Amino acid sequence: MKEKVKNIFFKIWYWYISTIDKNAEVIFMNYGYSKNNQKIILKKEDENNRYSIQLYNHTMAGIDIKEKNILEVGCGRGGGLSYINRYLSPNEVTGIDLNKKAIEFCKKKYTEENNTFLQANAQNLPFWNSSFEVVINVESSHRYPQVELFINEAYRILKPGGFFLLTDFGQSGELKMLEKHIKNAQFEIVKKENITNEVIEALSLSTPKRKVLIDKIIPTFLRGIAYQFAATEGSTTYNRFSNRYFEYVHYILKK
């Protein structure tokens, strides 16, 4: 029941954002990454999304994706995949999301020839075995009803030697179960990292801009919910990271 309520909420939220965000100002929905306020080099037009982009940059760090075929599962409104495509020179990029509105948005906004966006279920991916060299999943898998099915699907569609880059959060027991599924799928854990501190730092640094954007596009009576969703500093969601009710992990996995 809890997962059903969550899924209904996210579906309504995506619909709402798609309806009110006429200027495509919301293209990221992750919590971001910052370590000692170090900043990667970005173009001016990407500065407003710095911390969300830095989470993608950290997720991809250490893996050469140049000229490789990339799949993002749970691409949302496509900001992360757009960053990867523009900065990291992959061959082809494919994004899937269960939310129809999100995919419609991506198809309209990102028109490069090497982009493909599909509505699909992460637990039943519509691709042949060994189709991709890199699969990424950023802050999405915690919402899947049966995450083990997704982990197995990621293994199936990866080419031998391919990489699965996973970053997400959860409670301690949930993260232990996630790692159990990873091992059961026969992935090699190349790297495992706890990045909770870096996510908290990013949330603190990005709170002023997040609040400005929320106040700009969200009606007053919904702003409290929006602050929780965006994990602005002082919100219950933010505090759950700061008191370690939630932990944030990053994996580099190899088939």
Image (cartoon, grey):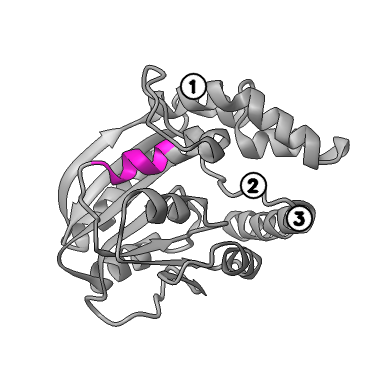
Q: Which residue is mark 1?
A: 242
Numbered disc in front, either 1 or 3: 3
Contact flag, marks 3 and 2 (Cβ < 8 Å): no
145 falls in the magenta region: no
Which residue does the image show at 34% across and 80% down from the upper left? Answer: 127
Q: Amino acid at mark 2?
A: Val
Q: Amino acid at mark 3?
A: Tyr
**Cα distance, mark 1 to mark 3?**
29 Å
Location of residue 176 in the rendering, given as x and y in whole percent from the top left corner: 30, 44
Which residues, given as a range, are shown in magenta? 54-61
Location of residue 115 in the rendering, given as x and y in whole percent from the top left corner: 44, 68
Which residue does the image show at 39% across and 75% down from the upper left? Answer: 125
User: Which quadrant would the N terminus be assigned to in this image?
Assistant: bottom right
Give the answer, above or below, for where 224 lies relative to 177.
above
Residue 16 circle label: 3
Residue 223 circle label: none
Q: Secondary structure at mark 1?
A: helix
| N-term-proximal mark, 1 vs 3 | 3
Residue 26 circle label: 2
